[in-house]
Image (spheres, rainbow, N blue to C red):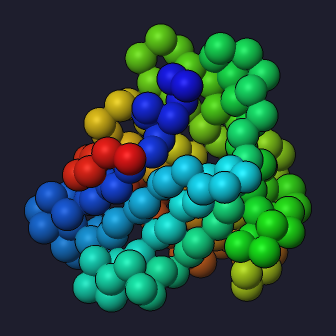
Amino acid sequence: MNFEKYLLGHWSNKAQAQSDPQNFASLNIVWKKIEDGYESMNYKRCRGAYDPYRRKYHKLEIVSDTEIIMHNYYTDWTPHEDCDMIFTFDGNSWTGRLIGNNCRGYRGHRIVSHIQLFGNKLHNMDQGYDDQGNLVWGTEKCYRYIRIKGE
């Protein structure tokens, strides 16, 4: 599937973090195929893959050749309510965003998430907002990853 070629693999923003350590932690994302779907894992390079700060399961719903819905789950396959994403393909990249504005994170913050898949580059921006609309975590700049290993 075209989407898998853009998504699966091991991603790192090490170059970005080294060039701008004040604004970007050195992070890794691993996307892999598992039985019944996909797994994503995010971890800080200094902590390693054995201590991820986010780990999720996913299933894809193919709407068309240029549109996919990614259903998001906790690692026991319980749906992460209101946190599904829609991805669209423009011929060069897949762009994803949350469907609606009701996704809540572990601490109750409203989540805003954007991701763009270019093939060997992945850009994403995740943010958490409190009930007053204040940004409480995340950044207003994209994290820029490169694929360091394919799936």
Quarter of the rendering containing residue 35: bottom right
The image shows residue 138 at horizontal and vertical percentages of 50, 69
For this orientation, the residue located farthest to the front is: 35
**How many numbered circles are shown?**
0
Q: In which quarter of the image is residue 87?
A: top right
Q: Foreground residue, 144 or 23?
A: 144
Does 89 sit above or below residue 58? above
Q: Position of residue 149 (x, y in %)?
A: 26, 51
At a point 34% along the width and 56% down the height, the residue shown is 10
Quadrant including the N terminus: top right
Q: Note whether 9 is above or below 86 in the view shown.
A: below
- Please name the residue shown 64% across and 66% down the image: 56
Residue in the foreground of this view, choosing between 137 and 106: 106
Residue 76 image position (x, y, % from top left): 78, 74
Res. 132 visible in picture = no
Residue drawn 38% across and 30% down?
118
Residue 75 in view (yes/no): yes
Q: Which of 94 and 76 is in front in this view?
A: 76
**Relative to 13, is 37 above or below?**
above
Residue 130 as seen in the image, left or right of residue 19: right
Q: In the image, is 98 to the left or to the right of 15?
A: right
Q: In this view, does 42 lie to the left or right of 147?
A: right
The quarter of the picture where residue 110 lies is: bottom right
Task: Indicate the position of residue 4 as horizontal and vertical percent values.
Answer: 51, 35
Residue at x 83%, y 46% (from the top left corner): 100
Left or right placement of residue 78 versus residue 9 in this view: right
Residue closest to the eye, 47 or 97: 47
